[in-house]
Image (spheres, grey):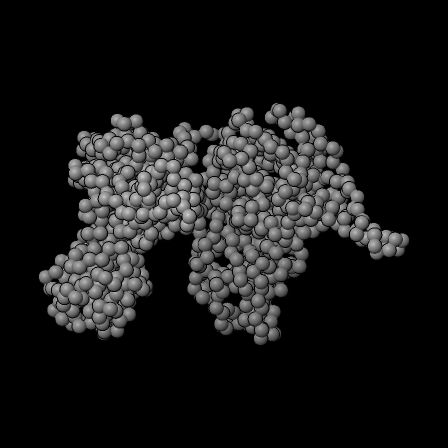
Amino acid sequence: GLAAASQRGRGVGSAPVWARGPRVALQSGRSCGQSWFTDCDWQNALTPSSCTYCPVRHSAGLRGQDKVLLRRSGQYCRDRTLPLGCLLERKESHNTRCLELPLLCAYTICRPRISLICRRHLKMLCRAALSPLVRSPGWCFVLPAHAIAAISRLYLPFHNQRLRNESIRCWSNIPFITVPLSRAHGKPFAHRSELKHAKRIVVKLGSAVVTRGDECGLALGRLASIVEQVSMLQNQGREMMIVTSGAVAFGKQRLRHEILLSQSVRQALHSGQSQLKDMAIPVLEARACAAAGQSGLMALYEAMFTQYSICAAQILVTNLDFHDEQKRRNLNGTLHELLRMNIVPIINTNDAVVPPPEPNSDLQGVNVISVKDNDSLAARLAVEMKTDLLIVLSDVEGLFDSPPGSDDAKLIDIFYPGDQQSVTFGTKSRVGMGGMEAKVKAALWALQGGTSVVIANGTHPKISGHVITDIVEGKKVGTFFSEVKPAGPTVEQQAEMARAGGRTLAALQPEQRAEIIYRLADLLTDQREEILLANKKDLEEAENKGRLALPLLKRLSLSTSKLNSLAIGLRQIAASSQDSVGRVIRRTRIAKDLDLEQVTVPIGVLLVIFESRPDCLPQVSALAIASGNGLLLKGGKEAAHSNQILHQLTQEALSIHGVRDAVQLLPQVNTREEVEDLCRLDKLIDLIIPRGSSQLVRNIQKAAKGIPVMGHSEGICHVFVDMDASVEKVTRIIRDSKCEYPAACNALETLLIHRDLLRTPLFDQIIDMLRVEQVKIHAGPKFASYLTFSPSEVKSLRTEYGDLECCIEVVDSVQEAVEHIHKYGSSHTDVIITENEKTAEFFLQHVDSACVFWNASTRFSDGYRFGLGAEVGISTSRIHARGPVGIEGLLTTKWLLRGDNHVVSDFSEHGSMKYLHESLPLPQRNAS
């Protein structure tokens, strides 16, 4: 935002009066004969000698007398000015943090016109917001307008101890991303989630990434996307370096054009136009192409980085530069100086003079690596510069356990030293000198030198636009090289174990699956002391950290009564699951001796993600066991101890029939990026069921790629009080719907009142009851119009409060109530309270929600209360399952056709057989 300025006399021109709150404004000190401040007025306010910042250095295009005014609203005695050069010097410090403030425009108030500065020219990194001088609210900057074009970044060192460990600061409504600018180098990151802390990063661009498919010219779209990502990370305070290929391809394009033009003229003079089409372009020598393309490649990089107000510098190296100690020191010093000045070094091998490649004999050791290609160059630079992360972009997704094009090829998510013996390397890419084997050897060398490495695809059109930022954010992209092997199986291995265990589980007899569930119910009561002790640890940790609200703490808590209720529900599931899997739901005789059956089968592997509800684990496990599905469980970290003991008991129950692996807990999945990666395993997971807040469900629905998600994003439940409602029923149903458990997804959120009930005793009773229960009321637009002094008007009629709050709105009829529910509801649960049966039936038939009730609380929308034993969630979708989802919702069907030498040609017009399509009786269900 920009500060509003008005004229206020101070004896010298007119001074701006700044609006309260931190703002940034760029103003002119010389406009229309007036000025808000002059150089002489502020020259002695704060001299460079009394400033704790770095020495004054004048930047090109800026005059030494230009000042930066720091003004606090209403406190002119604290005005400060600093020479602008002070702010242009970046002082290298391990404690410095970086803040980004994109400025969209700047106004020159006193001029008759408005100066608009493009964002790309004015993307400033402003550290002064956290400086001790200006960290309090109300400070703002005033810069001379003529200096704007010369400013690309604004830096101030920050050494405040109190704020040093903060990760996010806000200035006005703009969030600042702060990045730790240093870490102890020596060991690479052990996990992907740690990559977000990388400060110094090398991005290696392979030849296949920067060149076109015809190997002649650059892939400008990909290159522009990579530059944008590098610029974004640079503006976050990271130190970016690029090792690039492409000079040969760019030079080949230029030389071919020149040769073709030259030959065209020559042959046109001597042979005529007829032979132009027969011209052959000679084979071009790579060194000549590199010499011709190097300058053009760098000019292209400079033009692209300029769009983001970032300066780039070119460095050409050869293998000899690393063998000569003095040259190594010079190169190291140059790179450090460029990084200190916030310049992106672009490094490439000097292909115009580089000798022919030699065998990779030196890569067998770990102390020496020769620069033969850009892979080895990137690894050498990464170790020399002590970088935190090396990103190697190629034309493949990463490392595979078999040739990438084969049917059984699987991407290796994490590669460990020593695994290279199990990898078969294919051929090199269409261009370039390295190949995947060289990349792996260089990556392992860099890893041993203390640099983390990721090899990923930089050419895929769907991911190349964010591949670098995704890697830095810790997302599962490419192959991550790590020295630390996990203690247990990976997520992918657990998913495969769950699928194999689920198939074995589905093959068991119904009585055997029921026996497992009965055993789990017994364990819940027999081991209640251990369960409650683990739950007590979770509660104590949550209370000490203070990260959970009271409703979530209530969900987290387990008790003896809860465990007893869980055991009862599990026994209900066991009793009702005798004929769930393999049940015949349709039989048809297609023709003589050709019978068709449709039978129920498990869906496959379920992924259930739940928050703060450890009681969800045994419920969902029992439903998965009863339906023969494999199960992956991702619980909230706030319930880690409770989930662990409950999962152990579940596996103990499964062990009685040898299917222990059918239910898997995923304690290693903690971050949002890891959950998003989990939701992309479409080859291993068949259905995702999120149980938690509406925000959780929305995040999962957004992250899931190719996997259906069963659930509801919001629980906006309505209760409509009709004009014929019973006085005795209204208050009881509304109290139970709203106050019994306000955090539940089936709690009342919007109360619709018939207009004729306003200013009646029944309406007063409803309001009095809500007041006694301490329910905060928000008035809908129509309800507020009827009141002289109304409660706070609702911000949105699509609000799920999840607390002792609700909205009250007025409707004129049952038809309007139905329309309101369809417009603002979430298709979860809606209720009508009336004694008019005709009105009730109209409501029941016309409201398009998963659950529609008459004279009953919304809280009945629950699998246990429906007699399903338990539920995996409540679905508001219209495909497959809807409402509380029990065993039936976790099943699908398959078709079984039994014939005797039947072929379709027998049923043709002149065939010997005819279709019957007779419905056959279903087999009797198990009476037990």
Among all residues in the image, which is located at the extreme right?
A: 270
Q: Quadrant of residue 889?
A: top left
* Residue located 48% across and 48% down the image: 178
Residue 27 image point, x, y percent: 56, 66
Q: Is residue 795 visible?
A: yes
Q: Name the image quarter holding residue 651.
A: top left
Name the residue located 83 percent from the left edge and 54 percent from the top edge.
274
- Whether residue 891 is visible: no
Q: Say left or right for 49 vs 843.
A: right
Residue drawn at point x = 56 percent, y = 54 percent: 154
How far across and how far down the image is residue 59, in percent? Answer: 65, 55
In front here: 793 or 496?
496
Task: State whether residue 698 is above or below residue 241.
Answer: below
Q: In x, y percent, where is residue 440? A: 58, 32
Q: Position of residue 370 (x, y in %)?
A: 67, 30
**Left or right: where does residue 591 sit relative to residue 278?**
left
Q: Nearer the viewer, residue 796 or 602?
A: 602
